[in-house]
Image (spheres, coloured by chain):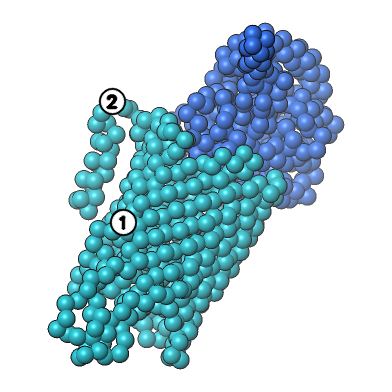
Chain colours: A cyan, B blue
């Protein structure tokens, strides 16, 4: 807590290091409080009303000078403070009308990943995000270069970024005794993320955005005993991955009170993984195998009377939600699958200052070896509030 | 060779002389005024459609594209277009000049004391709906003329003539609107949102309340009950509202009291038949005066 307060003080002072300014940044706070129940008999939450620790996001955001601005998002989740985002952007004045964003932030792979969970229509994170990006989404440290392409009749944007890559490795094997053990697996291996998006005004009331994303890099480095000989020197190999993504958002908004949104994303995962084969000389042979898996979601959301919205989502992904990270699970799993169906109802009594959301999600599992696992249903009731200035929503 | 060089020079300077000022406006009201003054010497587009609530706009990348190559962007100001800065940032246009048309307007309803969200969607710098007073449209037109002349001094005379012509036209319409509205002078009406104060002050109408309990706050049953009592007590005949708001609550009040609901656009292209500021004012004035 003390560190966080110190951090806020430092952040305020940064804006005044080289200049005298009497302008304060915007400060806003999003609070969230949830209660849930589930039908999973082996869990202590089964059939009970369970209250989660309230969470919050504190945003501090403002211009540093006429050309750039900075944003900090300090989150309090599950009883702990953390820096969710901290970045600066150069917005104008650069060659080719480029924008640069540097720091720690939600990376623009697909459309949903850059949006904070409180602004989603639904409550639970998409299943394929959990498998391929981890519980917090693709949130990484790096730098992004953004260009508007010279398409005159419609808007097109190209983002090219380089990142530390920790978020990609978070789904790898973790030592329960050492929360950062996954970092050792990658070493210093940056990843690359790019997105090409186009936006179209189909008519006065209908807009469409489509995007293509990709990410490439090393997700793990490890030693392989390729001969199955315990006395042989292991060979260190880098395991590469490629994510390709497709996303779209179609929105029809005939008036201020009604809108219909259909949105979807998909990801293909092509990666090298660690696999064990037959016993060689005295231990199993370790080899690199290439797998191809995928995941995605599609949802429909209908907003009516300005204050209400209702929607449904279908999720599909390779990998089993809730699995412990390992070299054969989550993003390294090419055998088992999870599917989910969600529904939600939201009520915003007064604009977006307060929201009540009811969400139901049913997820079910399909194991390649025939293992059976009951489907899981979770019902969540959530209250959100927004204190302070809030910006207009991007499309 | 000499002839070719001369032709190239004529072509170059001819092109420069024809260079248009590229303008984007936040609302269609400003769009119409800019068109009247700039005419063919400018190229103008707008962001918020006439049938949209200008308080709340989604950030569309297509609007960033409009601003990308613009020279000037005009806004109403006073906190109406909270979304504009995000669109400007997205456009990456570092040469864009932002013109706030509220600078010479006499502002009304500037809140005093501590301002917070308990007062609803309050505008800390004053009520921004000043274009509904046609005298303010003249001030806006003058500010637009100043900005266009600064940007394109070689066309200043042309802009001045257009400004003078428009003000003359507006002045004669103001006389007509005043005459038509004289029957409503001193009479109370109810409005949906607190957006008609400049209009009511100009034409001497008394605003007896709003359907919204506080600015931006949806109607509530208890507030409706208060309004019903007020409508009956003060013999209020008209509820005036913008056509982008839901008329559910006003219609309930109408059913209970017989009060007439007048739903009009407060922007150009906000409804069919409104293709200019003058047409918009005609529709508003005629709707009120015909329902006396």
Residue at 23%, 85% in the rendered image: A228
Task: Find numbered disc 2 in the image and state the secondary structure of the residue it sits on.
Answer: loop
Q: Residue furthest right?
A: B290
User: As displayed, is residue A248 above or below residue B246?
Assistant: below
Q: Quadrant of residue A287?
A: bottom left
What is the number of the mark on residue A190?
Answer: 1
Q: Earlier in the sequence, mark 2 or mark 1?
A: 2
Determine the chain carrying the residue at label 1: A
Cα separation between marks 2 and 1: 37 Å
What is the number of the mark on residue A20?
Answer: 2
Residue A223 lies, in percent from the top left, at: 23, 74
Residue at 36%, 72% in the rendered image: A272
Residue B190 lies, in percent from the top left, at: 70, 37
Task: Find numbered disc 1 in the image and state the secondary structure of the residue it sits on.
Answer: loop
Q: A183 and B100: which one is in front?
A: A183
Q: Quadrant of residue B200?
A: top right
What is the number of the mark on residue B132?
Answer: none
Q: Residue furthest left?
A: A231
Q: A332 and B290: which one is in front?
A: A332
């Amino acid at each position: 807590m003390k560190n966080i307060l110190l951090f806020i003080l430092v952040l305020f002072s940064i804006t005044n290091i080289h200049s005298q300014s009497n302008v304060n940044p915007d400060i806003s706070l999003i609070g969230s409080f949830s209660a849930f129940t589930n039908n999973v008999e082996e869990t202590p939450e089964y059939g009970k009303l369970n209250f989660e620790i309230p969470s919050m996001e504190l945003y501090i955001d403002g211009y540093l000078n006429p050309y750039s601005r900075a944003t900090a998002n300090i989150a309090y989740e599950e009883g702990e403070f953390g820096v969710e985002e901290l970045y600066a952007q150069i917005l104008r004045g650069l060659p080719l009308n480029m924008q640069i964003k540097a720091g720690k932030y939600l990376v623009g792979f697909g459309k949903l990943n850059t949006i904070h969970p409180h602004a989603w229509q639904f409550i639970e994170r998409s299943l394929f995000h959990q498998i391929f990006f981890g519980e917090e989404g693709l949130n990484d440290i790096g730098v992004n270069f953004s260009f508007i392409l010279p398409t005159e009749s419609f808007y097109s944007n190209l983002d090219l970024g380089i990142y530390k890559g920790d978020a990609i490795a978070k789904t790898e094997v973790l030592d329960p005794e050492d929360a950062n053990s996954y970092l050792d697996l990658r070493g210093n291996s940056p990843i690359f993320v790019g997105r090409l998006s186009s936006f179209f005004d189909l008519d006065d009331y209908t807009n469409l955005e489509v995007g293509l994303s990709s990410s490439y890099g090393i997700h793990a480095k490890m030693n392989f005993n390729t001969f199955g000989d315990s006395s042989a020197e292991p060979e260190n190999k880098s395991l590469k991955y490629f994510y390709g993504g497709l996303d779209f958002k179609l929105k029809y908004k005939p008036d201020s009170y009604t809108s219909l949104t259909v949105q979807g994303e998909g990801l293909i995962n092509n990666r090298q993984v660690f696999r064990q084969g037959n016993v060689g000389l005295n231990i199993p042979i370790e080899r690199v195998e290439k797998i191809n898996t995928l995941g995605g979601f599609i949802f429909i959301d209908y907003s009516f009377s300005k204050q209400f919205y209702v929607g449904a989502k279908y999720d599909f992904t390779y990998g089993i939600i809730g699995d412990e990270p390992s070299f054969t699970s989550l993003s390294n799993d090419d055998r088992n699958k999870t599917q989910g169906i969600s529904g939600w109802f939201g009520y915003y009594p007064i604009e977006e200052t307060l929201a009540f959301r009811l969400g139901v999600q049913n997820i079910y599992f399909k194991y390649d070896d025939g293992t059976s696992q009951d489907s899981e249903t979770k019902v969540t009731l959530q209250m959100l509030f927004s204190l302070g200035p809030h910006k207009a929503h991007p499309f | 060779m000499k002839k070719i060089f001369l032709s190239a020079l004529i072509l170059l300077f001819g092109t420069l002389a024809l260079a248009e000022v590229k303008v984007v406006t936040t609302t269609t009201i400003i769009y119409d005024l800019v068109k009247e003054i700039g005419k063919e010497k400018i190229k103008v587009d707008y962001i918020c459609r006439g049938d949209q609530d200008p308080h709340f706009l989604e950030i569309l990348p297509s609007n960033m594209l409009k601003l990308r190559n613009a020279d000037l962007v005009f806004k109403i100001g006073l906190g109406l277009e909270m979304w504009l800065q995000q669109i400007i940032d997205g456009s990456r246009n570092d040469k864009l000049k932002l013109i706030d048309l509220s600078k010479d307007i006499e502002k009304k309803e500037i809140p005093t004391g501590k301002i917070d969200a308990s007062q609803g969607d309050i505008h800390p710098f004053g009520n921004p709906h000043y274009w509904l007073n046609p005298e303010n449209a003249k001030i806006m037109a003058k500010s637009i003329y100043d900005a266009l002349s600064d940007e394109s001094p070689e066309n200043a005379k042309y802009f001045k003539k257009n400004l003078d012509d428009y003000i003359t036209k507006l002045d004669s319409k103001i006389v007509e609107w005043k005459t038509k509205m004289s029957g409503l002078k001193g009479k109370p009406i109810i409005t949906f949102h607190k957006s008609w104060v400049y209009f009511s002050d100009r034409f001497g109408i008394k605003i007896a309340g709003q359907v919204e309990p506080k600015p931006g706050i949806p109607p509530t049953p208890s507030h409706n009950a208060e309004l019903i009592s007020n409508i009956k007590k003060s013999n209020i005949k008209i509820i005036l509202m913008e056509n982008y708001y839901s008329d559910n609550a006003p219609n309930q009040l109408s059913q209970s009291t017989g009060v007439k609901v007048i739903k009009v656009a407060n922007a150009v292209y906000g409804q069919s038949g409104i293709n200019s500021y003058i047409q918009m004012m005609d529709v508003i004035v005629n709707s009120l005066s015909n329902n006396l």
